[in-house]
Image: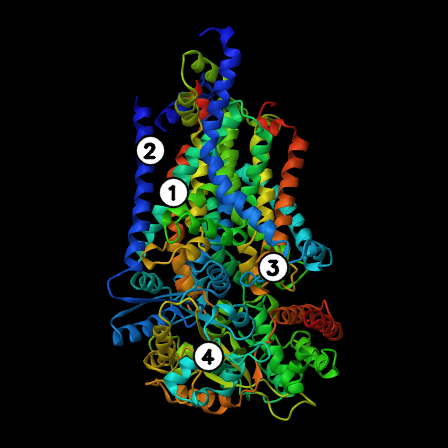
Amino acid sequence: MKRHKKSAAVAAATAFSIVLAGCAGSASKQDSSDESGLRALTFRSWSPIEQTTRQMVDAFTSANPDTKIDATIFNYPEYLVDLQTRASSGTMPDIIGLQPGALTQQYRSNLLPLQDCAQKTWGADWQKKFYPIGIDQARLGNPAGDENFYSLPLLVQTVNLWANTEIFEAGNAQIPKTWDELVAVVKQLKGGEYAPFMLPAKDSWLRNVVFLQIANNVEPGLVYQAEDGSDKWTNPKIVEAFTYWGKLFTDGIAQDGAIGLDAYPSGANQFEAGNAAMIPLGAWWIQQSDPSKTGIPPLSEGMSGYQPFLFPTIPGGAAQSQYVGGIDVALGISKNTKNPDLACKVLTDWIAGAGAQKLINTFNDLPAVTGLNPEKFTSDKQQQIWTTLTTEWMPQVKYSRYLKSPQLDTALGDALSAIATGQLTPKAAADKMQAEQEKVGG
Amino acid sequence: MKTAEETTTAAPAVPTQAATRASQPLRRRLRWEHAVLAPMAALWLIPIAMVIGMSLLPTSNPKTTAFGMFPAEPSLGNYVEIWTNNPILRNLINSALITVPSVLLVMLFGSMTAFALARLRVPLKAVIFGALTLALILPMSSIVVAVFKILQSMGLYNNLVGLVLVYTALGLPFAVIIIRTSFLAVPEELHEAASLDGASKFTVYWRIYLPLSRPALAVVAVWQCMSSWNDFLLPLVTLQDNELKPLTLIPLAYRGVFLSQPGALFAVLVLISLPIVVVFLAVQRYLVNGLSGAIK
Amino acid sequence: MTYVKIDKTSVRRERLAGTMFLLPAFLLFVLFVVYPIVYNVQASTLDWDGVNQGVFTGLGNYARLFDDPIFITTLKNSGWWILLTIIPQALIGFFLALLLNEKIRGRAIYRAIFFVPAVLSPVVVGIVWQRMLDPFNGVFVKVGQATGLDFLARGYLADPETAIFAAIVVNVWMWTGFSMLFYLAGLQLIDSSVLAAAKIDGASTWRTVRSIIWPMLRPTHLSLLLLGVIGSLKTFELVYVLTEGGPNHASEMLPTYTFKQAFQLQSVGYASTISVVLLLIAVVSSLSMVRAFGSGFLTGDAK
């Protein structure tokens, strides 16, 4: 008898909770789609970070009270799954985050060309507003004759090294400008509690940006010619670049186990905790000093403990270190959006309007447009670093931080990993890259 | 529950007799068990302690101590931040609305299927069982697009019911395998006796088999709870409204390529795991001599 | 009702009942399992990026598998994973279950401690273990330096020779508690007097365990074996967070490789092909288990 009652209760609970789930599901569905009078947009991306995005959304919706923006920010790999599913089933968000090149090209047929929107908002010479590398990369991979902009850059960046100046001062060391100085400084700083050169090389993107800095310092621009097929990966200069990459590991420059450490959170965390003298990251590191954040660690407070510098020159290579960088995130608009004009308004606001100001106030990364600065700096050092990055470095960036094709980008990451672990010699890695190049190209 | 424990204590005459005799060595043996279990538990706890340690890592001081396991300056700031920046309660309710029905449905449908496979004459038993393994193997990332399309065509896009159905379907094989094993251990005489009394198949299943397989149902409940509670890919893709989002979608915002708040990420992931630990603690009570006691 | 009448009508009625019992599961199964499989099989014949129109290539993607060294690595890794997770997890789990089936103090706490790793998100598990194993600043290396145990100070995750095994160790840590849970449930199916007998007579405990309890748990072993094989084959998140399949694909598993192909390399067709192969391997291995352990494994008739 008792048991009977119990089972009836379970059955009732099941039925009830299903009905409840049903109600919750359908009820909310209604209020999102036809809420009275509100023009709604959806935005999905992996960048900028969630808290910043919220401020950008608020900036726009408070200036345009008849609009509603549903923004979802999440991790890049999951973002790719989500985007693919939605694009293939007619539920693509109105505004999406994009990387230039392969990702933009994959969705090209689902995206609106944006040059008209840009021209309408900023005038005929709108392209001058942007850093040149951003304009270059926005059309990366377009088929011949297609001059459309399927995405517009939101944030750009340089890739470079950062030094912990406290460690450098305490060790009485100089920031290295050449490879030999780098080797000497690492030797000088060794033996402490910290790693002289922390290389969080588990991530393929990080291996690639470090290599591209080395390669462009060996022979500026050569890698991209090899990528186009107008030169070869087996060119001795590229093999030399691979050799220098390998030296980071074999000559004791990188810390032990570098190939197993991820950049985020582990590497970044250790650097911020003062466990490393140098780390290869990029301009976005300035976001550590974002004044809107609570609880900034001492090193990051007003960037007091950091100094950016370019990857040291390579013996026999270019006399000056080269600037490598590119688009961090670009925005695109879905072809199926019900409100193309509104989407254009949001997009341009976030790139160069009030939303952009909010974005830049958090030092999330460098703006894609020139002349946009944070309203408030927390220290002179922060301002000085910002000025260096935006007015000296970024305009000079000529070389891309990634390769065009995802196949080659992946193959490069694999080859670098194989060199680092001693599975491939630099020569063999170059051969492999060339083979991959011919497979992709042909 | 009560019946089970009563029967264990009142169990066969042999142990009672022996218990008095063995009370002295018993104490010594208990110590031996702790001597093995305690160090193992300590070993198991190290990474768990580090997870908790990192969730207490304040953004203002990323330095650590105790071999890097614990923050130099622990704080609850991450939990506060998670709590203030997210509609945790709303998300928690959504998670429960997805998980609870799917657990109940899996237990119900799974045990029905298991009963048919264990005790009824059904055609193509072997084929059915083999096909079940198919559902076990499917990784979410390979089926998410197809599942999305079905839900869309059923009008269940942006609807929690869709998630419940998918998790139930994917959880069934596990449930069937586990529950079937325990049904098989129920002596067939019980079944026959009941049938002769005129009980229908359903009554036999509901009144005899189901109550006897509580330990197996407990395992299934824990497993199903974990898998529908923890999945994030499907809700991410099939839900549109923020009001519908479950807890697991919060950590995604703290991951990102430029993740600089591992403390917050860990805090939210610890929060998400807590309810499952509670469920486990509640359910593990059923893992005491259920069957052997109840039959006698 | 008499015994004579039972034969025909009751057989028919039992079949009907059986069908009714199977129906709900069957419907869900067709919708959410069969269709995705069909979808994957179809996609596996295409050269397709998942968004734009695909090009039919027949069995081209399948032919490509044989030339793909990374695919071969994933098969090898899956083999190691199956071998090195199932056996230790079963042994340790069984041992823990035996101890924790008795009424000892703190039983619930012990059970919870061993089980908690299975509950944690693979994301935190991956990040924490990566930190512990980091040879520059990790817990292991520091403990190793403090105690002189040099083997603790190696970069297991950074070495292509050992990365997969390090991931397996983490997996064993994570899932042993679940095996324990299984054996605990399995032990409940054994008559308590058998267990009690094992408890009293200290001298022959080991023999009772080995020759009575262990064999009586055969259905549990088999379930765990089946789930272990399949769980190993579909390992994804832990490896993805811990090593991302690296260094240089050394710890790549079938699902991590599928994921990379589908979403990073935009080759959904090839990724589907790998998924189909994964399904085939799973079906073949479960069928061969049936072969090896007799059809009683399925129907439960033999025991």
Q: Which residue is mark 2?
A: A10
User: What amino acid is at disc 1?
Assistant: Val
User: What amino acid is at disc 3?
Assistant: Leu
Q: Which residue is mark 3?
A: C152
Q: Where residue B268 sits: x, y (%)?
A: 38, 58
Query: What is the crowding at mark 1: few (fewer than 14 residues within 10 Å), some, or many (at least 20)?
Result: some
- Mark-to-mark CA distance, 3 and 2: 51 Å
Q: Report which quarter residue A2 is drawn in.
A: top left
Q: Report which quarter residue B243 is drawn in.
A: bottom left
- Mark-to-mark CA distance, 4 and 3: 47 Å
Q: Residue furthest bottom?
A: A319
Nearest to the eye among marks 2 and 1: give it: 2
Task: Name the foreground residue: B143 vs A56.
Answer: B143
Q: Which residue is mark 4?
A: A153
Dot placed on the residue nearer the N-terminal end, 4 or 2: 2
Q: Give me the disc on residue B279.
A: 1
